[in-house]
Amino acid sequence: MSGSLAASDLSVRYETPHGSVHALRHVDIEAHPGEVIGIVGESGCGKSTLVTALANLLPANARVDGSIRYNGIDLAKLDARRQRLLRGDEIALVSQDPMTAFNPVLTIGDQLVDFQHHRKDLGRAQKRARIAAMLGRVGIADAELRMDCYPHELSGGMRQRVAIAAALLTDPGLLIADEPTTALDVTMEAQIIHLLRALRSEYNGIIIVVSHNLGVIAELCDRVYVMYAGEVVEGGEVDAIFHDARHPYTQALLACDPARFHERLDRLPTIPGSLPNLTQPPSGCVYAPRCACAFAPCGSVAPPLVKLSASHRARCHAVTP
Amino acid sequence: MSPLLTIDDLSVTFARAGLLSRLVNPFPLPSFNVIDGVTLSLMPGETLGLVGESGSGKTTLARTILGLVRAAAGRIVFEGRDVRTPADFRAMRRRSAMMFQDPVASLSPRLRIGTLLTEPQIIQGLPMPDRRAVAKALLALVGLPASFVDRFPHELSGGQARRVGVARALAMKPHLLLADEPTAGLDVSVQGDVLNLIGDLKRELGFAAMIVTHNLAMIRHVSDRLAIMYLGRLVEAGPTQDVFCAPMHPYTATLIQSEPIPDPRRRSQNPAVTGEIPSVFRRPSGCEFHTRCPIARDRCKTEAPTYRPMGTDRMVRCHFPLQTGGQEREAFSRASANQKGKLT
Ligand SMILES: Nc1ncnc2c1ncn2[C@@H]1O[C@H](COP(=O)(O)OP(=O)(O)OP(=O)(O)O)[C@@H](O)[C@H]1O
Ligand code: SF4
Ligand SMILES: [Mg+2]
């Protein structure tokens, strides 16, 4: 089963001894089967919080508001057991460090058999055959041999391939990859990018790729949401985001990426200032304290989400359609 | 001008580690050169980028230079003096600093950020009338809110904790800076701050820096010279711009081609190189890059190329270096374009 996903007015707070951290505020996103969605933004902007909320894996100190609808069903309205079932079967999360996803004392093969516990119709031999096929599909040579390996016997790139294979074995309608290449070397990163690209052509669910790396997002995604300090500040087709960015933060972020410049720069561009304290988010625009375009209303009035085209939106007072 | 630091034919040997692999492989294994015959020098005020993928030995090389790992062979000369004894290394370490690759893991989970940031200076006996103010200034330096002084490491996101580690190392105002992945995990908007800051401090204090990294996009802008490592050996060295504009070693060319481009209109067609990075414990015969090299020929499988000068200021370890207009360069472009569609 694969369906559309829509989060609306989604907010997440973490309760801490120093107050509530408003890690996610009024986020609206949607994703449709067959799409690769990119979530990009800098550290602490709430990317992981957003995708862990979608996967229902937030820590105990998190408080969630708003709705997440999958295939038309409001997940909050399901009872806990059905919610777990639905999310366990439908949503797979591949994390940044695939090592943490595996049990170090079990072989890859045994763990991947366990990943298919929902397939009551299959015997062990059939499950192993599925694994071998899936490992082959993610580009692991000698799949039969590799199934007898322990996680530490695989390279980082191979572990990430196995993690992707593990996720796909559950037949998820939504595959979330949180920084899938961040722990990898550049030649391995290129291979994983190509793997994800090759997979998407056969997979008709939703893929969400979370990354702080603009290059990875540009290589992989159809649509992109740009996050800053817990909010989605801009969203649109990948080409619009990279070639017609309208939000001042998106523009500044793109301008900072050294991969865009081939001539040696004496000083690398930066964004002056720092992230707002998320225990007391600014009352106006979250980006106002650092924004070069800020004017009268920005400090006190929250900016509207301005519709720029069918799919392009930016949350900014200075943007006009 | 004489070099600040010279490394001559340096090798580091590790015995194959791990009980498990020894059980699996009962034959007594000889030791392996994880660093093999590395020769390079660093001029005063210069920034050298040492580039390689994981397992290439970059971190080990940096740690060996500071005496944290023992060299099996070779020579280290710092400010004109041989560095041999533990006392020599201690003297050198007082004039240099290492920014470690994983400061997050070294942050004690029970101490508040403010304490963590000022601890190294206190240990070094530096006077500090107002610890909180120093900590806040350091936080500002790396783009974090001052309120973080009271936070604990686990309350930060991965990237935020990383910045704290960077601030901690920069607080020591080093003379020779050995920075291991100084911006890994940092945001692009902050990466520039840290590198500009290292650049400013360099100009002010005149120290030289060796930056160990796999981040090509970054090192291109901050280093004067580059040395590229593969499996513990240097495969190419030269002025940064020259190496980027006209890489001679196929491995260097591969690295540059693998970088994702932040432009959806210029998506890469296929991975520049396939296959896994081999291990130093099982070095391929001949040229160790031949297992992944798009232009490898028979000679590469059997005969190890030497590390030789090309022109006045470049070095390369390849039988068939890519040269502008040369047939190897053409063969490289053709070969890496041919891998279209292959997954591994
Ligand atoms: N368990 C927690 N308790 C309290 N605050 C938290 C917790 N987890 C995250 N935070 C805070 O919530 C905000 C968002 O964090 P999150 O991990 O979602 O960011 P991110 O965009 O994934 O960052 P990174 O790129 O560094 O992974 C940050 O300010 C972070 O400090
Ligand atoms: S609303 Fe104002 S402060 Fe916010 S991004 Fe737009 S111009 Fe800048
Ligand atoms: Mg994250």
Image (cartoon, coloured by chain):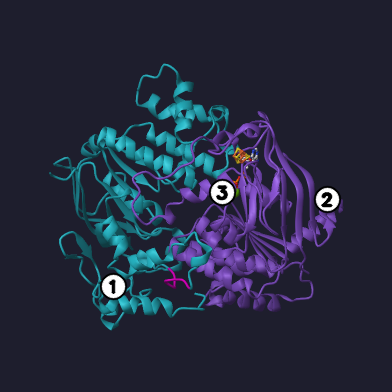
Chain colours: A purple, B cyan
Query: Spatial distance from mark 1 to mark 2, Cα to Cα?
Result: 59 Å
User: Which numbered tag is attached to residue A76?
Assistant: 2
Q: Chain of mark 1?
A: B
Q: Which residue is mark 1?
A: B287
The magenta stretch is B270-276
Labels 1 and 3 share a subunit: no
Label 1: element kind: loop
Q: Which residue is mark 3?
A: A250
Q: Chain of mark 2?
A: A
Label 3: element kind: helix
Location of residue A145 with respect to A161 vertically, above or below: below
For this rendering, which residue is in front, A1 or A287? A287
Q: Is residue B103 left or right of residue B246?
A: right
Amino acid type of the residue tagged 2 in the rendering? Ala
For this rendering, which residue is in front, B16 or A59? A59
Amino acid type of the residue tagged 1 in the rendering? Cys
Query: Spatial distance from mark 1 to mark 3, Cα to Cα?
Result: 45 Å
Query: Spatial distance from mark 2 to mark 3, Cα to Cα?
Result: 32 Å
| Mark before the other along the chain sequence, 2 or 3 | 2
Residue A58 x/y as whole percent = 71, 47
State which quarter of the image contains the N terminus of chain A.
bottom right
Q: Is residue B212 left or right of residue A235?
A: left
From the image, state whether disc 1 or disc 2 is nearer to you.
2
Residue A240 x/y as whole percent = 59, 58
